[in-house]
Amino acid sequence: MRYVEEFRDAELGRALAARILSLAEPGRRRKLMEVCGGHTHVIYRYAIDELLPDEVEMVHGPGCPVCVIPMGRVDDGIAIAAREEVVLACFGDMMRVPGSERSLQEAKAAGADVRVVYSPLDALRIARAEPEREVVFFAIGFETTAPSTALTLQRARAEGLGNFSCFCNHVLIEPPLRALLSAPELEIDGFVGPGHVATIVGARAFDFVAAEYGRPLVVSGFEPLDVLQSVEMVMRQLAEGRCEIENQYGRVVPDEGNPAALAALAEVFEPRETFEWRGLGEIERSALRLTDAYAELDAERRFELPGARVADPVECQCGEVLKGAIKPWECRVFGTACTPERAIGTCMVSPEGACAAYYNYGRLSREEQPA
Amino acid sequence: MSAAHDSGPSGEACITCGDRALPLQVVAPGSEPGLARCADPQGREEEVDVGLLGPVATGERLLVHAGAAIARLEGER
């Protein structure tokens, strides 16, 4: 297939790995964070970690929306779904995310009308087809996903659809990155930046990483060679003493992003004062809610919600995994009490979660780490 | 099954995340304004919201995430 095979060529991969090795300083370990869960998944699916020299350690960042949603918000979604009149439409990845007592999947088994959709527009179509039901879309995702929700809300508002609303959990990429970069214990030398978020916000939106925090970042595509080339570009910057924002994914990502998407986001959403991130705690202006112009479509204003803050299970170390402080296999319940089939922590739920990526691709212990 | 539902790089990836953005080709106008009928390389079709891109033409390749086209791929190199 055009555009795919050339990005999975094994020979090119080995050549890039050799270049990365040549850029590594013997004995000096560089920690690079891939921000996006999609990159984590690619790294383990294609065993990119095994191509990298010992001097390069990939640390997995907080860019998996399912992994960072706090339990209290899952409980709120379940409370909405429990209402007799409600159809709760959500992405399939949300179904198994544990709330404090149960998941949406378990709520569905207990009789709640929870339906998996593949887009916000699918949820809108349910509302059109079933005018006697209250259809609530459980919106999650970073700036990549939020424009699709915004377009659907614009459509619902233009139609005057009275039985549709949105439970908004969209989050922003810059505030958690700033939180990570400000943490004194974090030792990240450079970043592989999220390519599809950058499609919306633009590569220039990451300028602060270099300008304010002195770390290089390379916006990366999602094929194996994209990720390897991005690692090579970060390592080259480090070797040459440069600190810049570079765009490896220039075939898709414009410097300034998608202006129509940014305009739609600005019309429909506004930042919340604060939002809780699993493992990272409260981060100011890190999530979106509906503006007053869209109040009638806001499920948080339409329904009474518990709104409780729920502490993560004590045995779960997702927070430390999300901050890159420990590897998934270092968590005390990894692969034993916590598996993809029955997850305790969110990082084991989504295929993009670092724990699920490790578990699914056999990185089960220190012994099974590549030499 | 429509295009975007199972054909990520692994077939099991998470829809909320960036790597579920898929290259699809416009094959026909959609059923309402702002939508376009698109197909993946296997010919599986779905309707995509193209409101972020403005008018699209049959044959154009788009990057689609969660039911919305977020970029044109004509400039892909």
Image (cartoon, coloured by chain):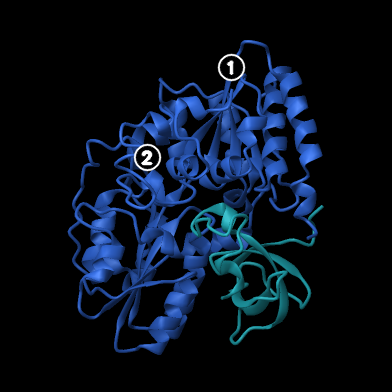
Chain colours: A blue, B cyan
- Tell me which residue sits at (69%, 70%) in the image: B40
Residue A223 locus on image (x, y percent): 68, 48
Task: Determine whether, in the image, residue A297 is placed left or right of residue A236.
Answer: left
Query: Which amino acid, mark 2?
Result: Gly
Q: Nearer the viewer, residue A91 or A260?
A: A91
Residue beneath label 2, please?
A: A335
- Tell me which residue sits at (35%, 62%) in the image: A95
Residue A218 locus on image (x, y percent): 65, 36
Query: Which amino acid, mark 1?
Result: Arg
Mark on residue A150?
A: none
Residue A18 locus on image (x, y percent): 77, 26
Of badges 1 and 2, nearer the viewer stands 2
Say what secondary structure mark 2 lies in. Answer: loop
Q: How many marks?
A: 2
Task: Determine whether, in the image, residue A257 is placed left or right of residue A351.
Answer: right
Residue beneath label 1, please?
A: A29
Q: Report the Cα–Cα distance between label 1 and label 2.
A: 28 Å
Packing grade of label 1 (10 A; few <14, some 14-19, many >=20) is: some
Identify the mark nearer the N-term, 1 or 2: 1
Vertical relation: A161 (above or below) A92: below
- Tell me which residue sits at (61%, 77%) in the image: B46
Task: Determine whether, in the image, residue A204 is placed left or right of residue A307.
Answer: right
Q: Nearer the viewer, residue B44 or A163?
A: B44
Residue A301 in sight here: no
Asked if marks 1 and 2 touch (Cβ < 8 Å), the reply is no
Callout 1: residue from which chain? A
Packing grade of label 2 (10 A; few <14, some 14-19, many >=20) is: many
- Tell me which residue sits at (52%, 66%) in the image: A148
Residue A133 locus on image (x, y percent): 30, 84
Say what secondary structure mark 1 lies in. Answer: loop
Callout 2: residue from which chain? A
On the same chain: label 1 and label 2?
yes
